[in-house]
Image (cartoon, rainbow, N blue to C red):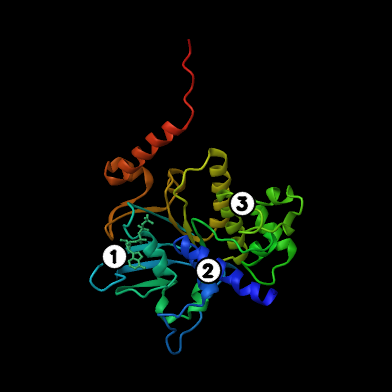
């Protein structure tokens, strides 16, 4: 029966992932080993993968153009440089092409024109395995395996010790939560186990990524509103994982973008505005309008103080 059950479990995860809009692309890729449109070039070499290898992690998009279909351009000449260890925030209306940027960096697709470089190497010249080892993705909505919390974190680096797993969980602000569960790290989670909240799942994903130790990080922030405490816990977990790493964040929250080295406002596949938070606010354009709107929404959600008599 177990033999029958395993593939069903596998299909369940695949189905869940598809249902959630392929948000957890890294996991999907490993699970499916999909028919790859993208092949390694003959003689492709490995990209140095980990921070511990002394790798730097500069990311350059050089006039990148791309469309999923040839008759519809999605990115129409996007250029930016994220210095090693720097943080780029990508904001913009829905459908602007934000996630497409992360898919191209992960090389799910090849650019139509222009190029993407990591530490000066065109990503088309390196092996896909080494590229994907260098990039950690924290998706909007993590799909957990139907297994223990230990397994779900440890998956970030096969062979990790218990101490390493717990250290990653501490940095991701999820260790104390796990220790309060009767079965601790042996607690089963996922569809048939303990249902974790969105914020808890995201912190498990962050712990997994800390363990993976990639030099480049893609964060896809959840759009849904979080309560203030959860938001603070996630922000502090994100700071731990972003520390020293080159970070590209698809941002939906003011708290994430204020400290970005550069913010790009993507609109209809082009960079409409770019700069740091204060400069963009001063410009009074699309960005300034976006945040004014978010601040107004936030005010509505926060409990209003009772007026003094
Ligand atoms: P959101 O904020 O809603 O996530 P986004 O800015 O991340 O939006 P993308 O997911 O990059 O937007 O999508 C940009 C455009 O590309 C959209 O119009 C979308 O319909 C289209 N698109 C995305 N994925 C595919 C695909 N696999 N095949 C064809 N078109 C796609």
Count every numbered label the image shows and give the total: 3
Mark 3 and mark 1: Cα distance apart in space: 35 Å
The foreground one among 197 and 263 is 197
Residue linked to disc 2: 14
The foreground one among 227 and 292 is 227
| Residue 201 lies in quadrant | bottom right
Give the mark nearer the N terminus: 2 vs 1.
2
- Kindly tell me whether residue 221 is visible in this rendering: yes
> In this view, which residue lies farthest toward the front?
1
State the mark number for residue 74: 1
Q: Residue at x 33, y 41 (%)?
A: 281
* Residue 177 x, y percent position in the rendering: 68, 48
Give neighbour class at mark 1: few <14, some 14-19, many 20+ (Cα, 10 Å). Answer: many
Q: Which element type, helix, strand or loop, lies under badge 3?
A: loop
Tell which quarter ligand 1 is in.
Answer: bottom left
Q: Which element type, helix, strand or loop, lies under badge 2?
A: helix
In this rendering, position of residue 305 left or right of residue 264: right
Mark 2 and mark 1: Cα distance apart in space: 27 Å
Give the mark nearer the N terminus: 2 vs 3.
2
Residue linked to disc 3: 196
* Residue 26 x, y percent position in the rendering: 51, 68
Give above or below for 96 relative to 54. Answer: above
The foreground one among 100 and 120 is 100
Q: Residue at x 51, y 66 (%)?
A: 15
Which tag is nearer the camera, tag 3 or tag 1? 3
């Amino acid at each position: 029966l177990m033999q029958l059950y395993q593939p069903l479990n596998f299909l369940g995860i695949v189905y869940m992932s598809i249902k959630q809009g392929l948000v957890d692309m890294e996991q999907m890729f490993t699970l499916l080993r999909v028919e790859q449109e993208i092949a390694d070039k003959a003689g492709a070499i490995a990209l140095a993968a980990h921070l511990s290898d002394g790798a730097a992690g500069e990311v350059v998009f050089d006039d990148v153009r791309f469309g999923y279909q040839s008759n519809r351009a999605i990115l129409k000449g996007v250029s930016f440089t994220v210095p090693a260890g720097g943080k780029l925030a990508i904001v913009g209306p829905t459908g602007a092409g934000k996630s497409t940027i992360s898919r191209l960096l992960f090389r799910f697709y090849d650019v139509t024109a222009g190029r993407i470089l990591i530490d000066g190497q065109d990503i088309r010249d390196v092996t896909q395995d080494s590229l994907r080892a260098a990039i950690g993705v924290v998706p909007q909505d993590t799909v957990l395996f139907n297994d223990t919390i230990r397994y779900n974190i440890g998956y970030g680096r096969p062979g990790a010790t218990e101490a390493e797993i717990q250290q990653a969980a501490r940095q991701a602000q999820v260790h104390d939560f796990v220790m309060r569960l009767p079965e601790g790290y042996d607690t089963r989670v996922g569809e048939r186990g303990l249902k974790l909240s969105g914020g808890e799942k995201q912190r498990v994903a962050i712990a997994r990524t800390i363990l993976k130790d990639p030099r480049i990080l893609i964060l896809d922030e959840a759009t849904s509103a979080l309560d203030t405490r959860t938001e603070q816990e996630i922000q502090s977990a994100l700071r731990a994982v972003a520390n020293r790493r080159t970070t590209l964040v698809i941002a939906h929250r003011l708290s994430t973008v204020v400290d970005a080295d550069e913010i790009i406002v993507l609109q209809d596949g082009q960079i409409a505005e770019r700069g740091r938070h204060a400069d963009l606010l001063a410009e009074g354009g699309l960005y300034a309008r976006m945040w004014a709107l978010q601040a107004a929404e936030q005010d509505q959600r926060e409990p209003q103080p009772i007026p003094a008599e």
